[in-house]
Amino acid sequence: MADKESTIQEVLLSLNLAGKVKKVLFEDVRTPWDERAFIKRKRDSLEVKLKIWDDEAFLYGRIYRLFLYVYDVLREEFRYDPKIAPDEEKEPRFRDRHNQIWSIYVDSRLEKMGIENFFDRITRRNIFVDSEKELPWEEANLIFDELWSKESYTYPEITEITYNLSVFAEKNIQVNKDKIECLVNKLLSQKGVLKQVERLSSLDLRKTLNELLSFTAYKCKDTYISANYYGINLTYNKRLYVEMIPAEDNTIFLTIIDPFTNKTVSSIINENTDIKVIQDKIYGIYKLMAQD
C-alpha cells in the first residue's frame, strides 16, 4: 500500500493534479487487464477510485496511465463529453473501438515520455489488430501505426475516428476481404464447438487434426486442450501457445505463439502438410515453457 500511495503522489505532482484530486481509493484486481480509473466529482475536488493489479511490475507506469485518463477528462482542450461516445449497450463494437483509441493515445504518450508500461506498443498493437477482425492484418497494422503516431486527440476526434476508422488512415487502404485472415475471422460469428471438426469435409484432414491433438496430449504434459466457438486452443500454465481454426475450405489455420515475446507465426495446414514439422514446432514452444 505504501508503494502505491507514494507512487500516486508522485504521479499527481507530475501531472499537476495534486490540488484537484483530494482522495484516492483502491480496489485490487487480478490482472493488469482489469485496471480502471473512476472519477467522482465533489464540489471543489475529485475523488478517484483505482482498480489496480496487486503487483509491483510496471507499477509507476500502470498508475501513471490510469491518471492520464483523469488528466484528459479535466483538460479543457480535450473536450471530454461522454454523451457523444457510442452507447455501450446499443453499439458495443464501436464503444470498444472508442475505448481502444483513447487507450492508444494514453499508452503512446507513455512511450514518448520513456515510462515503462505493461501496455507497450506491441501489446497495444496486438489488441487492436485482433479486435479489428473485418480488416486484413496488414491494413489494421497501418491504421494502428497512424493512431499511435498521432500527436494529440480531442474526445470528439476519438469519436469521429471510431465511426470512420478506414477514412482516418492517410494511406490508401484497399481492404481485401479474400485474405485468409478475413475468411478465418468470419468463423468468429459461428457458434457451436461441436461444429468445428465438421467444417472439414476431408477425412484425411480430420485425421491430421486428430493426430496433432493426440500428439499434444501425449508429448506436451499438462497442456490444456480447450475449444471455443471458433477454434481449438492449447494452453500451458494458463499461457496460450497454439491456436488451430478449422476452415470450411478444408484448411486449418494454425497460429503458434511465443508466450515470452508475444510473437506469432501463422501457417495453413492442408492435406499435403508435413505433420511432423508442425508437431516439432508445437513441442519446441512447449519445451521452452516447461523449462521456464
Image (spheres, grey):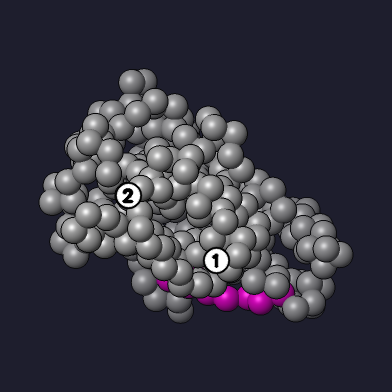
**Would residue 260 be found to the left or right of residue 133 on screen?**
right
Residue 271 horizontal/vertical position (percent)? 63, 56
Residue in the picture at 32% in, 42% down: 72
Kind of residue at badge 2: Lys
Q: Residues within 10 Å of mark 1 (few under 14, many from 20)?
A: many
Residue 31 horizontal/vertical position (percent)? 54, 67
Residue 92 horizontal/vertical position (percent)? 25, 59
**Would residue 237 be found to the left or right of residue 247 on screen?**
right
The boundaries of the magenta stretch are 223-233
Residue furthest right in the image? 291
Q: Which residue is mark 2?
A: 20
Count of numbered circles in the view: 2
Which quarter shows the C terminus? bottom right
Element class at badge 1: strand
Residue in the picture at 46% in, 79% down: 194
| 166 vs 52: above or below | above
